[in-house]
Image: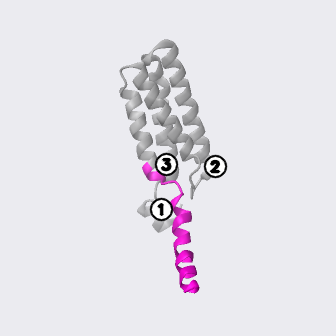
Amino acid sequence: MKALLFIIVLMLTPTLVFAEELDLETNMKNMGLAYKHSVQATQLSEFNTAIDEFITLVKLSKTATFHKEAESSRQGLDKVIAQAEIAKKLANEKGLDAAKKPLKSINELRQQYHKLHEPPSFWELLFGK
């Protein structure tokens, strides 16, 4: 009986350990939503709530396991955090319009760093890089 209980616990242990790993895809979708809310905000309080959530989610993404280009990915996330903090500061000091340029650069960084994780094309698979 003890052996059966031990086997059941042993079988469930990997599930419990891996359950705590960050679901990066879901987190990225939530980041996108928070970013969208910050861009569409019409009031400073709305903007601050959205950008704070965005920054928190980006920081959480840094804890994820990256299978390719891990260091470059984390550096990109640091750049995104820096731009988001600049946007927040400008919005609070000069108004929401002042935050548009750093918010735009966040989108450009997203596009740049997502290229690191794109799956290889058919031709790259066929002929290599």
Q: Amino acid at mark 1?
A: Glu
Question: Magenta stretch?
Answer: 1-26
Q: Residue furthest top?
A: 94
- Residue 105: % across, % down: 49, 31
Q: Residue at x 58, y 31 (%)?
A: 82
Question: Mark number for residue 26?
Answer: none
Could you classify mark 1 by the number of other residues whose Cα lies within 10 Å: few (under 14), some (14-19), or many (20 or more)? few
| Label located before the other in sequence (1 or 3) | 3
The residue where tag 3 is placed is 115
Quick check: 85 above or below 10? above
Instruction: Please identify, in this view, whether the residue under mark 1 or under mark 2 is nearer the observer.
Output: 2
Distance of label 1 from label 3 (alpha carbons): 14 Å
Q: Amino acid at mark 2?
A: Glu
Q: Residue furthest front?
A: 1
Q: Residue at x 41, y 40 (%)?
A: 32
Question: Mark number for residue 124?
Answer: 1
What secondary structure characterizes most of the magenta part? helix
Question: Mark number for residue 71?
Answer: 2
